[in-house]
Image (cartoon, helix red, strand yellow):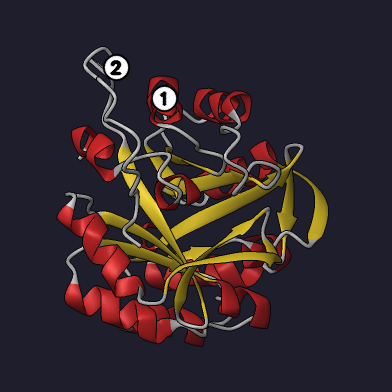
Amino acid sequence: MKVGENKDRSNLNSSAHGEGQAALEIIPAIDIIDGKCVRLTHGDYNQKKVYNEHPLEVAKEFEDAGIQRLHLVDLDGAKAGEVKNWKVLETIAGKTSMVIDFGGGIKSEKDVQIVFNSGARLATVGSIAVKDEKIFLEWIIKFGAEKFLLGADVKKEKITVSGWTEDTDLWVYDFISKYVEKGMKQIFCTDVSKDGALEGPSIELYKNIVQKFPGLHFIASGGVSSIDDVYQLQELGCKGVIIGKAIYEGRILLSELKQFV
């Protein structure tokens, strides 16, 4: 199956959208289980759908559409607590020129080294920044804050960790503030209730984050269901948007995204 394939739908006339808006970075997501491109709903491994057995094919389609960035998620690694699908990363990094951020199971400095050695430009981290701040700060000092993409997964504005299985009392704004002060440049936020549901992104949450942290390269993630959602996030001032299921289900066509790249 080709990504974004939907023969029953014509392209939207987008000339009325986006004029005069700041640039928005389109970041398609490829989630990996057993080396295959999949998507989950609400992060539930029991609600898994395989879209392509060859992630490189998917990545090349994105690159051919002019997209330059890729969000690669090792779901096996996230479950196991150590990087598993680094070979997929190595293959895509070696055969495309895309800027790849890779996450899922990065729990040790060895994992960080594997990710960078396999071709990722950024290592995506989340849980460890909550559960073991000391270790993450050591990584920031050693590798540089610009080498990490920090993920803030939330339920009702509170951080959740370990593949969304553990809730915390940590307010998302406090979490972001702490790491902005430590030099973090790029942060993305996923509302777990929206992820994979194709019901639209958490506009109010993202609006609040952008207003509170105007200098942050903030990336919205989760719930994007149409090209109109993408325009809305651009208008909010988001610097990037991670899009997954909407592309795979043909809700957003790659041709519609070309004006952003």
* Label 1 crowd (10 A; few <14 / some 14-19 / many >=20): some
**Label 2 to label 1, Cα distance in Å?**
9 Å
Question: Splitting the image into 4 quarters, where does residue 76 fall?
Answer: bottom right
Secondary structure of residue under mark 2? loop
Q: Residue furthest front?
A: 8
Question: Splitting the image into 4 quarters, where does residue 16 fall?
Answer: top left
In the rendered image, the vertical position of residue 124 relative to residue 201, given as above or below: below
Regarding residue 113, the answer to whether it shows in the image is no
Residue that numbered label 2 is attached to: 17
Q: Position of residue 164 (x, y in %)?
A: 72, 59
CB atoms of marks 2 and 1 within 8 Å: yes
In the rendered image, the vertical position of residue 236 relative to residue 168, given as above or below: above
Quadrant assignment for the N terminus: bottom left
Q: Residue visible at 39% across and 71% down?
A: 143
Name the residue nearer the viewer: 30 or 107. Answer: 30
What amino acid type is highlighted by mark number 1? Answer: Asp
Name the residue nearer the viewer: 165 or 245. Answer: 245
Name the residue nearer the viewer: 117 or 15. Answer: 15
Q: Residue visible at 42% across and 48% down?
A: 186
Q: Residue visible at 20% across and 40% down?
A: 261
Q: Position of residue 116 (x, y in %)?
A: 35, 77
Name the residue nearer the viewer: 146 or 259. Answer: 259
Q: Position of residue 47 (x, y in %)?
A: 68, 62
What amino acid type is highlighted by mark number 2? Answer: His
Q: Position of residue 46 (x, y in %)?
A: 71, 68
Question: Splitting the image into 4 quarters, where does residue 121 fall?
Answer: bottom left
As drawn, the label of residue 236 is none
Residue that numbered label 1 is attached to: 228
In the rendered image, the vertical position of residue 40 relative to residue 252, given as above or below: below
Q: Considering only order in the chain, which callout, 1 or 2, is on the residue closer to the N terminus?
A: 2
